[in-house]
Amino acid sequence: MRIDFKNIQVKDIEGNNSTVDIAKMLGNAIYQKTADLGELELAREIYKNGEVELTQEQVECIKSYVKTGFVAFVQEAVIAMLE
């Protein structure tokens, strides 16, 4: 699955669409909290490129970081993209 974390489509409170870039925030969140070398490399790739190819294991990893580190409207958009 290919995801571009620089172009996440979110909806505001009125239902209007906009795009947010969470690549650096997500990369930093993973980088600062992981004890896994694979996740560390994934964090670097997300931070530098924004667009990454993800395995199912990486998708589950990202879901867990998004659920604990991002506000609800971003969680809603990212998790929907990952499913």
Image: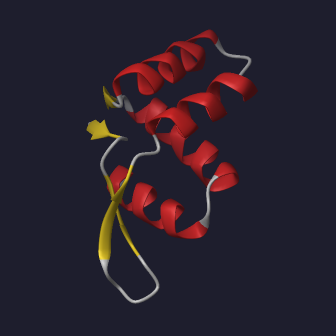
With 83 as the anchor, is 75 left or right in this view?
A: right
User: Which quadrant holds residue 5?
Assistant: top left
- The image quadrant where one finds the C terminus is bottom left
Q: From where the camera sits, is residue 61 visible? A: no
Q: Position of residue 36 (x, y in %)?
A: 67, 16
Which of 26 and 34 lies nearest the eye of the viewer? 26
Which residue sits furthest left? 2
Q: Position of residue 55 (x, y in %)?
A: 37, 29
User: Which quadrant holds residue 38?
Assistant: top right
Q: Position of residue 68 (x, y in %)?
A: 69, 52
Which of 82 and 12 lies nearest the eye of the viewer? 12
43, above or below 76, in the image: above
Which residue sits furthest bottom? 14
45, above or below 54, in the image: above
39, above or below 83, in the image: above
Residue pictured at 53% horizontal, 23% vertical: 43
With 83 as the anchor, is 60 left or right in this view?
A: right
User: Which color scheme does this rendered protein use?
Assistant: secondary structure
- The image quadrant where one finds the N terminus is top left
Residue pictured at 51% horizontal, 13% vertical: 41
Which of 57 and 77 lies nearest the eye of the viewer? 77
Residue pictured at 52% horizontal, 40% vertical: 62
